Amino acid sequence: MCSAVPQGYRSVGENRFREVVGRGLDEFVVGQVIEHRPARTVSDTDHALSLALTGNPAPVHSDIQFCQRMGRDRPLLCGIVTLGLVMGATVRSTSGLTSANLALDGVRFEHPVHVGDTLRAETEILKARPSKSRPEYGVVTCRTAGYNQHGQRVLSYTRTFLVPADADAARDATDY
């Protein structure tokens, strides 16, 4: 008995399916907007690990009394963590098969993010073209925005990355 291939998966054997990660060049359509899910709630652990890993000593991220004296009720999440969480949310459906990030431009932190905020991302495809120097790849440029649980945009940036021209060939070669 053969099962139909579920959406978002590809057949890799009889009645066996593998989740699709990333896209090939021909799957990027200029003007297309992707709503990334699931959303992600920022945890105390995310915040504590980011401070430990970066060694960021800024009290706006770690000292509640400092924040209160500066007119903030609680510490801010470090911007690089916000960027990482939002960008990470986009990978599965955009750059999961990428072989290189080429540029990250116009990064704007537009609204504060705190522990307990839930972040989601949306990406608009701006450009998609074959690579001039590597014909087996394509160059994709997209604009991503991150939003909190109130629909406020907290972050935006433009990103350019290299994807395989033929996603199925890349998946077959890499066992993805």
Image (cartoon, helix red, strand yellow):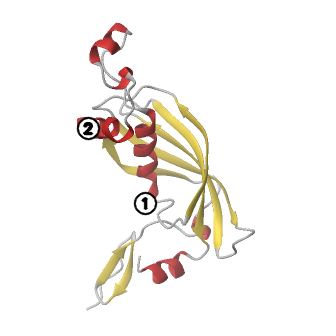
Contact (Cβ within 8 Å) of mark 2 with mark 1:
no
Q: Can you give x and y, in whole percent of width and height, for residue 152 in the image? A: 44, 29
- In the rendering, which numbered label is found on residue 101? none
Q: Is residue 100 above or below residue 31?
A: below
Which residue is disc 1 drawn over? 92
Write down the quadrant of residue 138 in the picture: bottom right
Looking at the picture, which amino acid does disc 1 mark?
Answer: Arg
Report the front residue among 105 and 141: 105
Q: Nearer the viewer, residue 98 or 94?
A: 98
Q: Position of residue 100 (x, y in %)?
A: 57, 62
Amino acid tagged 2: Ser
Residue 29 locus on image (x, y percent): 62, 60
Compare residues 130 and 72 and report the one nearer the observer.
Answer: 72
Which residue is drawn at the image coordinates 35% and 26% (left, top)?
61
**Is 41 situated left or right of 54 in this image?**
left
The quadrant of the rendering that contains the N terminus is bottom left
Q: Which residue is mark 2?
A: 43
Q: Secondary structure at mark 1?
A: loop
Residue at the spot 48% in from the left edge and 83% down from the top edge: 173
Q: Quadrant of the C terminus?
A: bottom left
